[in-house]
Amino acid sequence: MDQIKENPKSILEQWVNQFSDELYSWAFFKTSSKEVAEDLVQDTFMAAFYKIDSFQGKSHPKTWLFSILNNKVIDYYRLSARTTKKNFSLTENSGYELSDGIFNTYGCWKSNDINAAWDQDQELLDNPEFNSIMENCMDDLPQKWKLAVTSKYLSDKKTETICQELEITASNYWQIVHRSKLLLKKCLELKWV
């Protein structure tokens, strides 16, 4: 602890060398953007530098840095959610109409037979080509929707936590997840099946 107070610059330099790669990997996983991940890691170390006096050593430095990074990621998504248009069309980012192929001309659900490709879910997840297409389809989702889906299915977060991070209600969250799944299904059917 005294070593940090005596030479914070040197200690922070050690942390940069020690933890940069792990922090970058986490930031990239959360944002899917190399540039954003690099900026968030840089912001994390800048915040750590300015707040190093508040580090009490009760946790491992890596834990403290990851905590700062997670807050930076949340701030990034909050800011991007505020700056995106409030009223967007489902076709704005994806190019697909949500209702295409789902409803008939009378507004009733179409009875679609399930494509045989969807029965091989374990094999699909091992297929690099499928994973690449899935990633492209995920990138087509509006940013808030993508974050909701990745938080639920990849990070396995609880609904309450996701709603707090995205600053949305639970009913809005479930609507976003439902619509995201419909768009992903449609995208995969167009690009994969």
Image (cartoon, rainbow, N blue to C red):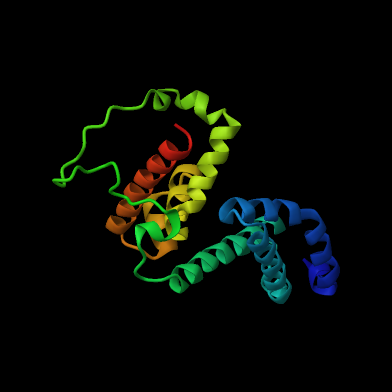
Q: Nearer the viewer, residue 101 or 25?
A: 101
> In front: 149, or 137?
137
Q: Nearer the viewer, residue 100 or 34?
A: 100
Taking 63 as reference, is 76 above or below it? below
Residue at x 55%, y 37% (from the top left corner) = 131
> What residue is shown at x 67% (from left), y 51% (from top)?
25
x 32%, y 47%: residue:
178
Task: Give the answer, above or below, for where 132 lies relative to 120.
Answer: below
Q: Please tell me whether residue 28 is drawn above or below residue 189 in the rendered image.
A: below
Q: Nearer the viewer, residue 20 or 15?
A: 20
Q: Quadrant of residue 73?
A: bottom right
Residue 156: where, in percent of width, then height? 46, 44
Q: Where does residue 139 sit, x and y in percent of width and height?
A: 51, 52
Q: Position of residue 152 (x, y in %)?
A: 43, 47
Single out the residue that lies furthest toward the bottom: 50
**Total marks placed:** 0
- Residue 58 visible in this rendered orientation of the protein: no
On the picture, is 35 further left or further right than 163?
A: right
Among all residues in the image, which is located at the extreme left? Answer: 106
Say which quarter of the image contains residue 57. bottom right
- Rendered location of residue 193, percent (x, y): 44, 31
Q: Is residue 138 left or right of residue 11?
A: left
Q: Is residue 6 in view from this perspective?
A: yes
Q: Residue at x 63, y 63 (%)?
A: 36
The N terminus lies in which quarter of the figure?
bottom right
